[in-house]
Image (cartoon, rainbow, N blue to C red):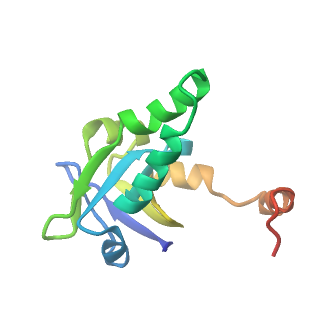
Amino acid sequence: MFMGEYNHTVDTKGRLIIPSRFRDELGDEFVVTKGLDGCLFVFPNNEWQAFEEKLKALPLTNKSARQFARFFVAGATPCELDKQGRILLPGTLREFAGLEKDVVLTGMLNRIEIWSKSKWNENNSYDDMDDIAEQMTDLGLSI
């Protein structure tokens, strides 16, 4: 399970250090793809395979289902850690997420999210958390 928030930087070659707490869970190879809300998603291979199966089960005749699958699969790239615990993020994914230098990596249970620090600060102020918590009870989650 991934959890926690870590601040790092992308170097001029597009490499990013993955926090040591995440490395064992990720394994030797994993998948990075476009994520929702303008971030990147990082999936360990087993989680990516489970997600792939769900995407394969979507009806090919449904345009929204095709677009949803295309969004995640077309931008997906296999990655592996180098000896310094870094990954090379493809330019297309860095551009999609607006990753230039300062980034935030967050553990999100079965995946990691990679955010530009500015987008993270804009999208995750938590000012409306009480309202969001009320909505979660509608989804069956209560504290």
Is 118 positioned to the left or the right of 21 in the image? right
- Percent from the top left, x then y, of residue 128? 78, 57
How far from the left and from the top, in percent, is residue 123?
61, 50
Visible in this render: residue 94? yes
Image height of 67 relative to 77, above or below: above
Q: Nearer the viewer, residue 66 or 43?
A: 66
Q: Residue furthest left?
A: 83
| Between 123 and 24, the one nearer to me in the picture | 24
Q: Nearer the viewer, residue 22 or 98?
A: 22
Q: Residue at x 21, y 64 (%)?
A: 81
Disc tally is 0
**Point 44% across, 39% down: residue:** 72
Residue at 56% over, 44% down: 37
Q: Is residue 111 left or right of residue 80?
A: right
x 40%, y 41%: residue: 98
Q: Nearer the viewer, residue 4 or 120?
A: 4
In the picture, the quarter occupied by the C terminus is: bottom right
With 99 as the anchor, is 140 left or right in this view? right
Q: Is residue 58 left or right of residue 15?
A: right
- Choose top left, top right, bottom left or bottom right for residue 73: top left
> Residue 114, can we see it?
no
Image location of residue 40, percent across then percent down: 43, 48
